[in-house]
Image (cartoon, grey):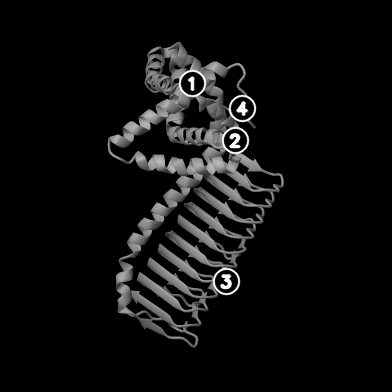
Amino acid sequence: MKTIILFLVLLFPILTIAQFQADEEIIVTETQNDDLYLTGEKVKLDAKVYGDVVSAGGKIRIMDSISQDLICAGGEIDIRGYVADDIRTAGGELTIDSQVGDDLIVVGGEILITDDTIINGNLISCGGDLDIDGDVRGLAKVCGGDITLNGKIAKQASFYGGKVIINGEIRGKSKIVAETIEIGDDAKFYDDVEYWTEDGEVDFKNSLINASAVINEDLAREQYQVSWGFFGAAALSFWFFYILSVFLVLLILNLLFKNLFSKAVAYLDKEVLKSLGYGMAYLIGIPLVIIITFIILIGIPIGLLLTSLYLFSLLFGHLVVALLIVHYLDKRNDKPWNFWTVVLLALAIAMVIRLITFIPILGGIISLLIIAIAYGALTITLLKYKTSLQLST
């Protein structure tokens, strides 16, 4: 029991630092001359970045320019700064109010592309409600529940949705497949339109300029594929967010604790059974300590704290295992890997571990054992180096 308590005392600063990095509000106000990686409950970029930006968070606001790509995932995303290359983003509510140097790829629940937005490449989008009010200078491929076009599309356009409203301008050939299609008074088609709707023929009014609109019954089957498209988009959005979040957590863990991981891997060879024992003591012992603290009324605040730390450690257990495996392999490698190689390899291993956990019964047992060994090795390292351990910066 003393070992478990000591482990928590030693681990507390590590977990709180990592949690702070992951959960606190992050505001960037100084110019960044390299790639930038951000994760937080609230993230605000209010300075120029001369490189890529990768971000994950609850609420993300991009207010200044980015010289290369923007990749982000979150609950609420607001992009108002100029992005010189591609934007790839997924989220719940998204607002794009900027100039995009190349393609915009966006997946979300509610998507608004404002009338001030200029997309110099292609638009690829899928979501629940989509409002496209800006200027797309490439082609557009859009699927959604309710889709409204008030802006301009310079090349071909494809729309798949429940309800599609066209009140903008399309210069290239168009394909529209929806339950309901509405053509507004300001709609303009400069090339041929191929469409299908459950309502039958659609009145295109005066929107066809040297073009024709033809209903194509063969497109009917594509309507029933829209639901699968939504499912695929939702799955893509989830995995995009998950992989990005895992990458950023691995980045932070390796940045802060690479010395700890490098020292801990020594026990994976020499004292693997001892590591397993310490790890099982941690995984089984901590819940007992938490129960005791809740029984003692004055220990309730401590119990709540221990619960959050314990859940935190379980949540990121497979990431800790992945980093330990990579550092173990790195020790055996003749030429040490650089920082980014370690993080990317850990990301790949973390994905494999996550897939293994989906195996009924066996996956859970394997996951429990490797997480126990990992935390056991860290416990032994902390106990032996508690006075001299220095976190890498």
* Residue 218 picture location, percent across and down: 31, 77
- Assess whether mark 2 and mark 3 are in contact (beta carbons under 8 angstroms): no
* Residue 163 picture location, percent across and down: 38, 67
Residue bearing the label numbered 4: 391
Decide which of tag 3 and tag 2 comes sooner along the chain.
Answer: 3
Q: Which mark is residue 137?
A: 3
Q: Secondary structure at mark 3?
A: loop
Q: Secondary structure at mark 1?
A: helix
What is the C-alpha distance between the residues marked 3 and 1? 57 Å
Instruction: Name the residue at 52% across, 22% down.
Output: 11
Q: Which mark is residue 255?
A: 2
Instruction: Name the residue nearer the viewer: 154 or 49.
Output: 49
Work out whether residue 192 can be spotted.
yes
Which of discs 4 and 3 lies nearer the camera? The answer is 4
- Assess whether mark 2 and mark 1 are in contact (beta carbons under 8 angstroms): no
Q: Secondary structure at mark 2?
A: helix
- Assess whether mark 2 and mark 4 are in contact (beta carbons under 8 angstroms): no
Q: In the rendered image, which quarter is residue 144 located in?
A: bottom left
Residue 352 appears left or right of 60:
left
Decide which of tag 1 and tag 2 comes sooner along the chain.
Answer: 2
Instruction: Name the residue at 43% across, 35% down.
Output: 318
Decide which of tag 4 and tag 1 comes sooner along the chain.
Answer: 1
The answer to whether 3 is drawn above or below residue 250 in the figure is above
Q: In the rendered image, which quarter is residue 85 located in?
A: bottom right
